[in-house]
Image (tube, rainbow, N blue to C red):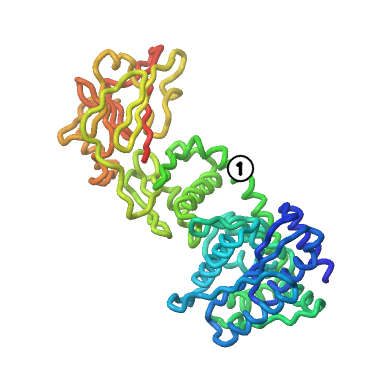
Amino acid sequence: MVGELRRSVADVLQRSRLKGGHLIVSVSGGQDSLAVLQALHALRDDFGLDLTCAHFDHGLRGVASGADADFVQQLCESYGVQCVLGAADPNVSLATEEAARDARYAFLAGVADRVGTDAVVLGHTATDQAETVLLNVMRGTGLTGLAAMRPDSRRAIGDSTLRLIRPLLTVSRAETLAYCEAVGLVPRVDGSNDSDEFTRNRVRSSLVPLMRTFNPRVEGALVRLADNAAQALELVEAEADEAWAGNVTENGDSVTIRAAARSLPAAVLAAMVRRAVGRLRGDLVDVRQDHIDDVMALLTGNAGLQVDLPGGLRARSRSGAVVIRRSGDAASPDISGEYRVVVPGELQLPGWTVSTEIVKSDGLSIAALAVPDGLTASLDPSLVQSALWVRGWLPGDRIQPMGMAGTKKVQDLFVDGKVPREERGSIPLLVNEHGVMWVVGHRVAERAKLPANAKLALRVRAERRA
């Protein structure tokens, strides 16, 4: 057992290229974290490792918590390993699993900032992995949740990003206990692990034993499921990387997913939505698959529909796209004044960049020239023969939509598209002496449509910006 567990740890160190690295080891005093600390200490010379131990007292176990800290500190002294102790703020409640976890990670991030590190090592085992998969399934998850924990990952914590190494994900909890016994360590026992107050404990004490009656090796099956999901997720993420630049605009306080992204495979689009949420929040805590599905549905819904997301974010369908921003952030500013259009050229107006160019259309159908995101229009090139400008909506504006005999109020277009009243002034209109030629994100005027036999087209593109 000793050799097998150390080989598991060594394999992860090798794959993660951590030879000669400085590692912070999170040690509670329980069997799993003791096993990984002892194994790393045994491998220290082979890998040229510099180790620092970090122990966090959650303040949930009274006198026993202090005894845990003393035990870890004494063990580190015997190993010649620096030990950094931390404790929870007594004025902050850690009554939930999530609160305790967040406090622990914040402590680890603080230690990493003070002492410097290549990675933080955690003692999560295959048993923990199986429980995590089940918890994620019950909450409602996609590939990311099924993949659960990975041997080498990163986690954003405030302004920091920690590299997390979990070298025991192929080792069961029973094996870490056997390892501790073999090397003469007596782990501390946390009585709270037997409490049914926490969901994970109920999964461990009730659900997993029940599943073993159907499959005695169910933990191994769940770990393999996580590995297979991780492999599939890697492919999906690669596709999302490739599609990101052409379908997403980032503006610091918001992320816009263009309507063209609706043509992507669902798994790739879901990965992009998840990434957008993660970049705005810094993490994906409490973000479930149903949240991702709701945002994806906005791409095919009417403008103005919205979804509230965990972490104070809000996603809204807008001008053929989906904009995700913090729910308290202001929408785009109203467009005041008129902006003269130069062709070719680019103009900046509040919340938008509008660019124009003449492109060849000879031999191409109107459909081939169209960009299906509502933010690009291929128009009659003769429009450049008179003055063109961009401005915001004014009460009384009308347009003859392409294909219609009569005119329609622009306000009615906004009502039909469920554009919130407070956002209507931020939508650009392309106009000339004859009136509105294009309501960005909505309709092109009959007078501005590209003739079927045109050899050139006036291409106008509007892009949102901060």
- Image x and y of residue 249, in percent: 44, 39
- Image x and y of residue 172, in percent: 73, 70
Q: Nearer the viewer, residue 123 or 407?
A: 123
Name of the residue lying farthest toward the bottom: 63
Q: Is residue 343 left or right of residue 92?
A: left
- Image x and y of residue 89, in percent: 47, 75
Q: How many marks?
A: 1
Q: Nearer the viewer, residue 131 or 51?
A: 51
Q: Quadrant of the C terminus?
A: top left
Q: Quadrant of the N terminus?
A: bottom right
Query: Can you tell which quarter of the image residue 13 is in?
Result: bottom right
Q: Is residue 27 left or right of residue 4?
A: left
Check disc 1 and report the residue beneath it.
238
Observer able to see residue 130? no
Q: Nearer the viewer, residue 30 or 112?
A: 112
- The residue depicted at 35 percent of the width and 42 percent of the height is 318
Query: Where 434 sits versus 119, above or below?
Result: above
Query: Can you tell which quarter of the image residue 91 is in?
Result: bottom left
Question: What crowding class fits label 1: few (fewer than 14 Cα within 10 Å), some (14-19), or many (20 or more)?
Answer: few
Q: Nearer the viewer, residue 193 or 413?
A: 193
Query: Where 175 sits versus 157, above or below?
Result: below
SS type, badge 1: helix
Amino acid type at circle 1 is Ala
- Image x and y of residue 105, in percent: 55, 65
Observer able to see residue 266? yes
- The residue depicted at 59 percent of the width and 54 percent of the height is 143
Q: Is residue 193 left or right of residue 7?
A: left
